[in-house]
């Protein structure tokens, strides 16, 4: 008899503990099976709302992350030079005493001398609050590198966002368009959803220069050229407008399409929304003489009659085309645009009571996108998508949205109190991520996609893209970045937020940046996530001011969370004339021995995700889906076997030692015992804390309620998550759904159940543009005016990114030595293409890549994230690195042949910044003008406890070395001029053969 | 040599949907994790943090690029795998892409646009496998009750005849290292020198200590697009048999005559334009004469309701 030792009924372990995964940003529910005190097995929790039991390659390999030899084991004090990786192990008392010594001096002198930046952590609700208590404005996480274009464009446009803050209606959508969707965020929910769509026969279109994971199962792959998505979306809008395939009723009900925009060139309110005395936006409504409708009655304020002859159009038509005799009978009135049951007009020019003219916002959108600039034939070559394909895609979108509309039998009440028996759905959904975000035109591109969604009536309707609670919020949300300190040294708010006008910027009296990363300055006014990638350069330059301590948590800024990585590593070690480091102190907290550890003066070792409490809070980055508001915790599943401490506990401990308000009491004793205690007892506003579930003394309250000492126990008993279902009547139309908004208010998500008006036309942007034109109390310095005026266009537009012109950035640059003229932009302020600007030396350099940059560096180079790895962690995992221990450069076969390089050759990838020797492979599934590689697989020798000859080190490479941190003229970061988002997908390169293509070996050679 | 059991009605196996597999490797790693600590583990790794990390996997995912216009006969052709001995050892080093020119093991029409096909590969639990009959010790055997092919480690002498007999590259073995590796200190290595392979998670599917819903192979539970199904392919009424019938599920390389039990579902036809060909022409009222009437003029008097 075979196999006498076959055991089929062995228990998996002694104990199962549920918690939340941290192998990427999905936050799936996991079950950790323990055996003899060790982790034996981790699988997906079938009862968890995020992953429904599935688990990805990263999640399953978490066991090897937890037992990684790269885990830090004890606090470290640097004993060699920075970068040498020479440390002495010290105890926690010594480590925390030293950190307290540095930080207490800073707080007494000037809290802004602390720059506190965190990486991909999920505790910004804590870290941002801590920075606020410390009093430094110099705080942010890594969103400026990663996603802020999407967050800002979404928040300023519709009070929601792509990424993981909204989702396609997986149950009802018939057509899903994926724009540059990365496979590393929300990945299990997206994969589950794609599986549903495939089973149901919905069409999936992947717009992406690279056909990798999701694209490989899509029905259609559209290999768009990187950075031209906005142009493609604009061409789709052009087609929809041309063919009248627009959901006008959706526009006037839920957006500001009908709001009248003042047209008064030169005036201080040019381009702002016309408002009545009470500040309510105005629109024009049809007004039949002598028989005003009851609905309009009462809503009309200061009615103004229009004569047909005053109606003209700006789009090239002559007045005689405007009217015919029959329609001459009509008059028009101004009306409160927020009133229900009116019949607003969305085209034409109207005269305001003061005699000035105004046009509906929709007309400005239409004028922009009906222009030939956005005609499919015009954009086809640049986008790399045939005009016929663009027209067909537009027709498909319209076909599904309008001919295949759906209606769900869900009764609901809108914010005007009107009751509806059903919900009309436009079953077209879109999703977008890093392929849109990581370009210097990402903000406007993302806004263009949102405009496309709005024109189709496809935001938060059945079958379309849906908000996830706590969104929608007002567009933009009402929290502005803190600007000043209170007498106790704390900031008057969170350091990050959404500026509403130039008054909210963090600039000094001369209009210069106040923050070390120049966020919320005239350089990047809407930098809602900060600019992690610029911190080190500015800190070394002392621009705007000296930093004493750079405190980093999980931000691998010495490697893949930097651009111009080689230079960044040198900057971290740079010394002043006295031989002192220009950044006097660097404290780094991480669980692993990453590349950045080498540059730290003091290393605070964190635990793994299975050894601590964490909080995935609705105040931060919750695990909600469209059906429910949800949050989660992590819990210590096993005890650390090393002398490490949870970073959150350490942060609170430091706060106590520093006697920070709300962390130390009058006696200097800790207000919170540890992070677990903080998660339960801390209240952000009365009744609102880190966790929404089981609040109130008897655990009966949801969302808002006094702290419940037993709250964590409830979470532990409920698989570490809490879920509050959205009421059924609130399922869709949440921007104007009373049932939803009242529930959201009860949960503490919105201050009032007022409707949220989507900003087809973004008036906030116009406020900045007006300042650039010389209006208002806070105006940009002369050198910034043209740039602000150009990019703060309230109507989205497309322009080319700037990386093709990035210049080398030598170390010897002095702060503030740029010729201010080099920042001058064009005199004209609204060109949508073909604009020019003055480069260094006054020469006019084209902004579009038709100039020298195009011929010298004709290819786009981008990265993708492998689905089995997340950021830098994955490739030190003993299982995942067996799937890929190195990366290669993938090139279209025709492109490779044209460069006289063979498949498998070693060759050079060259950017303006320098060149790298890499191995190339053919990949027909990429746009011919695009080369790509996996991100962050390449590792620095000595880091992550990998062998010296590991493939990650010897053969793999990090593309970041070739990406300039500065834009072409060096005055600005290589990023989006609205948000500052790093434009790492704007990299332009060329390929050159190597004389010895068969000899392996990676190396980097940078221009000096 | 080892005898096969008499043919049985029950044929447990996997159905893998190549239409929805995104190549994420979730199944492969979940498999590695379960089995590393399970009844058939550990699954040893060589040089895990060094120059040539390589270990035993029961399930690997290979990604192919399928290019070229025209269609092929959708009848089960003879899809050709790359050399399994090569794909077993270092296949995954470079994005798991064997090569752009490799014939992907997928029958059916080819798209004129390059397509990626992700192909998970594990033991097919053949009905008449040579990997069993060549075994000199009886270590490699096929279970009579459900058709699962297993290796009894106590009898395996590591001769590797079975691996040579299997054309699918489904069997893997870790040999004892020439010298101990410092970086691998402490990791369990007891299975070195014996053949290892997919067990269909036989230590899960009958395991009464697990919830009933968890009595599935780890790869099936893990799959994020739900592209993997487990069941009795000998029962025509089973869910897996029905989906195979409905979707034209096929056996891999049937010409070898080993009668694989596992089935692959081919990619569905992709709709690159067909869906909308009608839409472009159909609603004529929507396609206005834009020469005669510019859009902005059309909207001047548009009656809307707010």
Image (tube, rainbow, N blue to C red):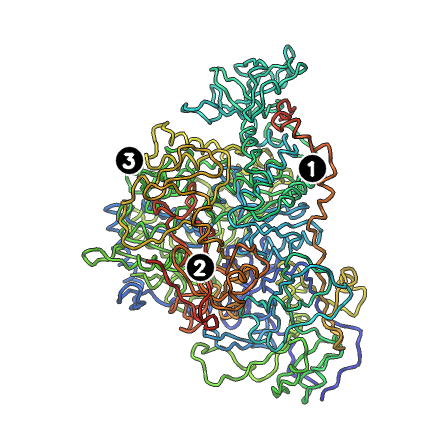
The front one of A742 and A125 is: A125
Earlier along the polypeptide chain: callout 2 or callout 1? 1
The picture quadrant where one finds residue A606 is bottom left
User: Which of the numbered marks, if any, corresponds to residue A402?
Assistant: 1
Q: Which residue is mark 2?
A: A959
Sort mark 1 into few (<14), some (14-19) or many (20+) by Cα contacts within 10 Å: some
Q: Is residue A831 left or right of residue B98?
A: left
Q: Nearer the viewer, mark 2 or mark 1?
A: 2
Q: Disc 2 and disc 3: Cα gap in Å?
A: 37 Å
Earlier along the polypeptide chain: callout 2 or callout 3? 3
**Image vertical order of residue A518 relative to residue A613, above or below:** above
Q: Quadrant of the N terminus of chain A?
A: bottom right
Residue A730 appearing in the image: yes
Q: Are marks 1 and 3 in contact (CB under 8 Å)?
A: no
Q: Which residue is mark 3?
A: A510
Residue A350 lies, in percent from the top left, at 54, 19
Q: Quadrant of the C terminus of chain A?
A: bottom left
The front one of A737 and A806 is: A806
Q: Residue, x 62% and y 85% (percent of image)?
A: B160
- On whether disc 2 and disc 3 are found on a single subunit, the reply is yes
């Amino acid at each position: 008899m075979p196999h006498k030792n076959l055991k089929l009924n062995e228990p998996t372990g002694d104990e199962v503990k549920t918690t939340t995964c941290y192998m990427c940003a999905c936050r799936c529910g996991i079950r950790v099976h323990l055996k003899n005190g060790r982790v034996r097995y981790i699988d997906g929790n079938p009862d968890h709302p995020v992953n429904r039991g599935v688990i990805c390659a990263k999640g399953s390999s978490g066991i090897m992350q937890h037992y990684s030899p790269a885990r830090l084991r004890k606090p470290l004090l640097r004993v060699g030079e920075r970068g040498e990786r020479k440390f002495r192990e010290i105890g926690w008392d010594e480590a925390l005493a030293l950190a307290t010594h540095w930080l207490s001096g800073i707080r007494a002198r000037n809290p802004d001398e602390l720059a506190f930046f965190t990486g991909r952590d999920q505790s910004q609700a804590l870290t941002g609050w801590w920075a606020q208590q410390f009093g430094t404005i110099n705080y942010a996480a890594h969103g400026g590198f990663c996603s802020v274009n999407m967050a800002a464009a979404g928040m300023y446009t519709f009070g929601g966002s792509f990424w993981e803050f909204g989702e396609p209606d997986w149950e009802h959508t018939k057509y899903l368009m994926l724009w540059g969707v990365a496979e590393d965020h929300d990945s299990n929910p997206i994969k589950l959803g794609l599986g549903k769509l495939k089973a149901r026969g919905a069409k999936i279109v992947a717009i992406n220069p690279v056909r990798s994971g999701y694209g490989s199962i899509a029905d259609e792959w559209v290999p768009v050229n990187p950075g031209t998505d906005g142009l493609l979306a604009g061409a789709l809008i052009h087609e929809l407008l041309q063919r009248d395939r627009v959901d006008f009723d959706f526009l006037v009900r839920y957006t500001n399409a009908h709001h009248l925009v003042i047209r008064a060139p030169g005036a201080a309110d040019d381009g702002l929304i016309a408002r009545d005395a009470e500040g309510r936006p105005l629109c024009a409504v049809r007004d039949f003489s002598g028989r005003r409708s009851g609905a309009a009655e009462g809503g009309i304020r200061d009615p103004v009659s229009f004569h047909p002859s005053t109606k003209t159009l700006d789009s090239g038509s002559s007045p005689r085309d405007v009217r015919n005799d029959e329609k001459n009978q009509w008059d028009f009135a101004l009306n409160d645009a927020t009133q229900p049951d009116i019949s607003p007009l969305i085209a034409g020019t109207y005269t305001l009571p003061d005699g000035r003219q105004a046009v509906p916002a929709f007309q400005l959108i239409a004028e922009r996108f009906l222009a030939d600039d956005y005609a499919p034939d015009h954009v086809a070559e640049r986008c790399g998508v045939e005009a016929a394909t663009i027209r067909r895609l537009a027709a498909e979108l319209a076909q599904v949205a309008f001919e295949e509309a759906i209606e769900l039998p869900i009764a609901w009440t809108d914010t005007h109190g009107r009751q509806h028996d059903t919900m009309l759905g436009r079953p077209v959904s879109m999703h977008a991520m890093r392929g849109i975000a990581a370009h210097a035109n990402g903000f406007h591109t993302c806004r263009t996609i949102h405009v496309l969604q709005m024109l189709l009536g496809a935001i938060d309707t059945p079958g379309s893209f849906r908000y996830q609670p706590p969104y929608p919020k007002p567009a933009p949300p009402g929290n502005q970045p803190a600007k000043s300190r209170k007498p106790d040294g704390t900031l008057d708010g969170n350091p990050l937020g959404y500026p509403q006008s130039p008054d909210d910027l963090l600039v000094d009296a001369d209009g210069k940046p106040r923050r070390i990363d120049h966020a919320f300055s005239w350089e990047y006014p809407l930098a809602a996530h900060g600019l992690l990638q610029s911190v080190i350069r500015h800190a070394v330059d002392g621009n705007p001011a000296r930093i004493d301590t750079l405190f980093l948590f999980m931000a691998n800024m010495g490697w893949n969370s930097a651009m111009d990585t080689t230079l960044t590593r040198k900057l971290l070690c740079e010394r002043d004339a006295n031989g002192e480091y220009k950044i006097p102190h660097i404290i780094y907290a991480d669980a692993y021995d990453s590349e950045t550890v080498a540059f730290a003066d003091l290393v605070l070792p964190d635990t793994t995700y299975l050894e601590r409490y964490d909080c995935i809070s609705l105040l931060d980055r919750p695990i909600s889906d469209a059906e429910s508001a949800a949050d989660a915790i992590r819990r210590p599943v096993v005890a650390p076997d090393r002398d490490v401490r949870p970073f959150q506990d350490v942060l609170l401990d430091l706060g106590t030692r520093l006697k920070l308000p709300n962390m130390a009491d009058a006696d200097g004793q800790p207000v919170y015992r540890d992070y677990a205690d903080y998660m339960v007892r801390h209240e952000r506003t009365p009744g609102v804390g880190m966790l929404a579930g089981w609040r109130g003394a008897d655990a009966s309250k949801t969302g808002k309620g006094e702290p419940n000492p037993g709250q964590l126990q409830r979470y532990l008993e409920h698989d570490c998550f809490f879920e509050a279902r959205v009421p059924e009547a609130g399922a869709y139309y949440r921007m104007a759904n009373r049932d939803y908004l009242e529930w959201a208010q009860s949960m503490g998500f919105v201050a009032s159940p007022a409707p949220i008006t989507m900003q087809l036309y973004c008036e906030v942007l116009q406020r900045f543009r007006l300042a650039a034109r010389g209006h208002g109390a806070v105006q940009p310095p002369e050198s910034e005016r043209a740039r602000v005026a150009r990019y703060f266009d309230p109507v989205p537009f497309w322009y080319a990114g700037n990386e093709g012109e990035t210049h080398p950035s030598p170390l010897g640059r002095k702060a503030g030595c740029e010729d201010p003229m080099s920042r001058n932009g064009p005199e004209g302020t609204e060109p949508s293409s073909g604009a020019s600007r003055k480069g260094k030396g006054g020469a006019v350099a084209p902004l579009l890549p038709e100039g020298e940059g195009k011929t010298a560096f004709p290819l786009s180079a981008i990265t993708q994230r492998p689905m089995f790895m997340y950021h830098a962690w994955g490739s030190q995992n003993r299982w995942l690195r067996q799937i890929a221990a190195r990366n290669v450069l993938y090139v279209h076969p025709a492109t490779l042949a044209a460069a006289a390089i063979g498949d498998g050759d070693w060759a050079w990838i060259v950017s303006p910044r320098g060149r790298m020797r890499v191995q190339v492979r053919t990949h027909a599934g990429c746009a011919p003008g695009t080369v790509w590689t996996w991100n962050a697989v390449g590792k620095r020798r000595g880091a992550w406890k990998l062998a010296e000859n590991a493939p990650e080190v010897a053969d793999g490479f990090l593309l970041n070395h070739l990406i300039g941190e500065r834009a072409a003229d060096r005055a600005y970061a290589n990023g989006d001029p609205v948000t500052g988002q790093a434009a790492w997908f704007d990299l332009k390169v060329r390929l050159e053969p190597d004389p010895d293509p068969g000899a392996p070996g990676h190396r980097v050679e940078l221009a000096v | 040599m080892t005898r096969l059991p008499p043919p049985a009605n029950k044929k447990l196996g996997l159905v893998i949907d190549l239409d929805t597999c995104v190549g994420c490797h979730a199944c492969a790693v979940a498999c590695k994790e379960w089995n590393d600590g399970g009844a058939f583990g550990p699954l040893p790794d060589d040089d895990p943090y060094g120059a040539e990390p390589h270990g035993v996997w029961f399930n690997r995912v290979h990604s192919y690029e399928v290019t070229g216009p025209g269609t092929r006969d959708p009848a089960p052709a003879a899809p050709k795998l790359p050399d399994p001995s090569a794909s077993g050892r270092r296949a995954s080093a470079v994005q798991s892409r064997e090569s752009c020119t490799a014939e992907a093991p997928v029958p059916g029409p080819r798209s004129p646009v390059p397509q990626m096909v992700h192909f998970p590969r594990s033991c097919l639990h053949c009905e008449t496998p040579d990997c069993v009959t060549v075994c000199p010790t009886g270590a490699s055997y096929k279970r009579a009750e459900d058709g699962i092919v297993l290796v009894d480690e106590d009898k395996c002498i590591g001769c590797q005849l079975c691996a040579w007999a299997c054309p699918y590259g489904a069997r893997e073995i870790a040999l004892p290292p020439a010298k101990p590796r410092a970086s691998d200190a402490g990791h369990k290595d007891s299975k070195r020198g014996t053949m290892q392979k997919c067990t269909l998670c036989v230590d899960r599917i009958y395991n009464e200590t697990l919830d009933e819903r968890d009595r599935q192979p780890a790869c099936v539970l893990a799959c994020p697009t739900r592209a993997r199904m487990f069941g009795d392919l000998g029962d025509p009424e089973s869910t897996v048999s029905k989906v195979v019938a409905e979707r034209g599920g096929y056996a891999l390389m049937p010409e070898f005559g080993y009668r694989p039990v596992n089935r692959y579902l081919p990619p569905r036809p992709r709709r690159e334009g067909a869906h909308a060909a009608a839409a472009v022409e159909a609603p004529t009222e929507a396609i206005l004469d834009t020469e005669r009437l510019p859009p902005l003029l059309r909207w001047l008097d548009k009656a809307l309701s707010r």
